[in-house]
């Protein structure tokens, strides 16, 4: 039995082929340097390659990266498995209530905000590396962090003036 392509089927086939030509690698594997885990020195090197201030530091517990932006210091650390990058920034000079921080958590889709053990408002952002992500996604993470940090300080400053 002969099979015939009807005009609608031809249109669907042509559309599918045009997508293959336009997007030859849907997974992006050809242009993606995959990162599945990372250590602190490699994280600092990546940040420096983006012209970000990154200094490897050591405390009693572990290594971390101090990222200075707009006279504020953020701390980046790795999860124990090396598969999650965690950014923390806090402000001991900024008053915030848990209700204000809960408002942030409800309104924003990235990160979480809370009062740390010293009562300082803290913003935590993270990116998962498990399963591998493109290095470009890591670069986007730092851009998102800069935006989120500016927005977080602005919102808390505005709310504390009320």
Image (cartoon, grey):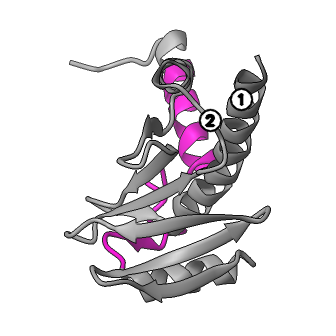
Distance (Cα) linking label 1 and label 2: 12 Å
Q: Nearer the viewer, residue 146 or 34?
A: 146
Q: Secondary structure at mark 1?
A: helix
Locate the N terminus by quadrant.
Answer: top left
Rendered image: mark on residue 155:
1
**Residue 23 among magenta residues:** yes
The disc, 1 or 2, on the residue closer to the chain's N-terminal end is 2
Locate the C terminus by quadrant.
Answer: top right
- Residue 24 visible, this angle: no
Return the x and y of residue 148 as percentages of the image width and height: 64, 42
User: How many numbered circles are shown?
Assistant: 2
Picture quadrant where residue 114 is located: top left
- Residue 64 visible, this angle: yes
Q: Nearer the viewer, residue 101 or 39?
A: 101
Rendered image: mark on residue 95:
2
Against 144, residue 9 (above or below) is above
Mark 1 and mark 2 residues within 8 Å of each other at the beta carbon: no
Q: Residues within 10 Å of mark 1 (few under 14, many from 20)?
A: some
Q: Which residues are magenta?
A: 10-38
**Residue 103 among magenta residues:** no
Rendered image: mark on residue 57:
none
Against 41, residue 83 (above or below) is above
Q: Residues within 10 Å of mark 2 (few under 14, many from 20)?
A: some
């Amino acid at each position: 039995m002969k099979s015939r392509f009807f005009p609608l089927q031809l249109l669907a086939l042509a559309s599918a082929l045009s997508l293959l030509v336009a997007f030859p690698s849907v997974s992006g594997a050809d242009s993606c340097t995959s990162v599945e885990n990372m250590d602190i020195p490699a994280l600092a090197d990546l940040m420096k390659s983006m012209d970000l201030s990154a200094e490897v530091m050591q405390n009693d517990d572990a290594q971390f990266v101090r990222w200075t932006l707009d006279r504020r210091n953020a701390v980046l650390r790795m999860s124990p498995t090396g598969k999650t990058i965690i950014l923390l920034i806090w402000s001991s000079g900024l008053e915030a209530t848990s209700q204000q921080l809960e408002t942030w958590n409800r309104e924003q889709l990235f990160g979480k905000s809370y009062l740390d053990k010293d009562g300082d408002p803290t913003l935590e952002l993270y990116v998962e590396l498990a399963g591998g992500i493109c290095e470009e996604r890591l670069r986007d993470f730092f851009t998102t962090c800069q935006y989120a940090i500016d927005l977080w300080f602005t919102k808390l400053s505005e709310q504390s003036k009320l």
